[in-house]
Image (cartoon, helix red, strand yellow):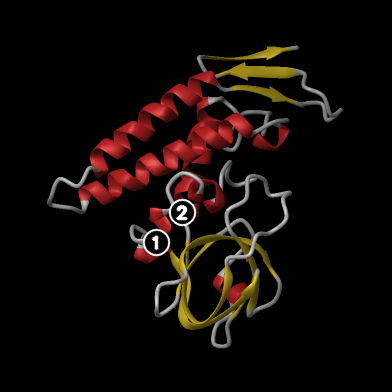
């Protein structure tokens, strides 16, 4: 495990971070020759595999007349030039929903994976487990349910992204307020987290840790 959340999770809260406010230095690939047919997106002059595109990522698509203009989740990387994409789904288990059909589509795959990985280290350090705590005998892979940590991680990533955007702007654009808003959500969510750990590998929790007062307890 390298992160508690992915780009798909961030898209659910702040789609604009993949359309207008993406980080140009974190673009994996982009082009102008995309073809969309249902949930199948195909390009001819790119290589999604080499670019590091993965399921759970986000792709921004736009055609010339603007009838297609939005960010969509990447359901699967089917080949070097073909993706299955979908309108954002409630669950990764749901069937893909097609955005429509379009040709000559401009596309961009950007990511906030570096930020999510950093938050992962900070959260595991906070809970006293590896890899954030390098001397702990307990690792993040021992966590049974990461849902609470996923939500906290999303808030932390978005807070950090808006802080970065705010620091680059001269005018008052509300980015600092959004950063502080998500930072507060992160702190509250982190404190509410109660994680169950399967240390002995039997499939059931035998230790737990609560965000409000970090202390590993045998169950």
Farthest residue toward the right? 202
Question: Percent x, y for residue 162?
Answer: 32, 45
Farthest residue toward the left? 170
Question: Percent x, y for residue 217?
Answer: 67, 12
115 shown above or below 127 = below
Dot 1 crowding, Cα within 10 Å, few <14, some 14–19, many 20+ = some
What residue is at 52 percent from the left and 30 percent from the top?
A: 125
181 shown above or below 87 = above
What residue is at 39 percent from the left and 61 percent from the top?
A: 19
Query: Is any part of residue 133 visible from this angle?
Result: no
Q: Nearer the viewer, residue 214 or 74?
A: 74
Using residue 66 as the reference point, say whether residue 94 is left or right of it.
right
For the C terminus, the quadrant is top right
Give the secondary structure at mark 1: helix
Which residue is the site of mark 1?
19
Using residue 138 as the reference point, say whether residue 13 is left or right of it.
left
Q: Nearer the viewer, residue 22 or 140?
A: 22
Dot 2 crowding, Cα within 10 Å, few <14, some 14–19, many 20+ = many
Q: CA distance from mark 2 to mark 1?
A: 13 Å
Farthest residue toward the bottom? 44
218 shown above or below 163 = above
Residue 32: image tag? none
Q: Earlier in the sequence, mark 2 or mark 1?
A: 1
Question: Percent x, y for residue 210?
Answer: 58, 17
Which residue is the site of mark 2?
112
Query: Is any part of residue 51 visible from this angle?
Result: yes
């Amino acid at each position: 495990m390298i992160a508690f959340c992915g780009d798909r999770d961030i898209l659910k809260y702040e789609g604009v971070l993949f359309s207008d406010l993406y980080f140009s230095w974190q673009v994996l690939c982009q082009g102008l020759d995309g073809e969309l047919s249902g949930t199948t997106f195909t390009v001819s002059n790119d290589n999604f595999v080499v670019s590091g595109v993965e399921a759970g990522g986000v792709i921004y698509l736009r055609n010339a007349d603007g009838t297609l203009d939005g960010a969509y989740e990447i359901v699967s990387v089917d080949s070097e030039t073909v993706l299955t994409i979908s309108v954002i789904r409630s669950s990764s288990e749901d069937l893909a929903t097609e955005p429509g059909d379009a040709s000559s589509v401009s596309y961009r795959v950007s990511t906030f994976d570096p930020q999510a990985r950093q938050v992962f280290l900070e959260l595991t350090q906070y809970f006293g487990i590896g890899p954030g705590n390098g001397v702990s005998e307990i690792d993040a892979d021992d966590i049974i349910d990461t849902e609470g940590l996923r939500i906290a991680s999303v808030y932390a990533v978005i807070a950090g992204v808006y802080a970065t955007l705010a620091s680059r702007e001269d005018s008052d654009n509300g980015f600092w307020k959004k950063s502080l808003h998500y930072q507060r959500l992160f702190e509250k969510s982190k404190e509410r987290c109660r994680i169950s750990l399967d240390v002995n590998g039997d499939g059931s929790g035998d230790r737990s840790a609560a965000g409000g007062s970090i202390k590993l307890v045998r169950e």
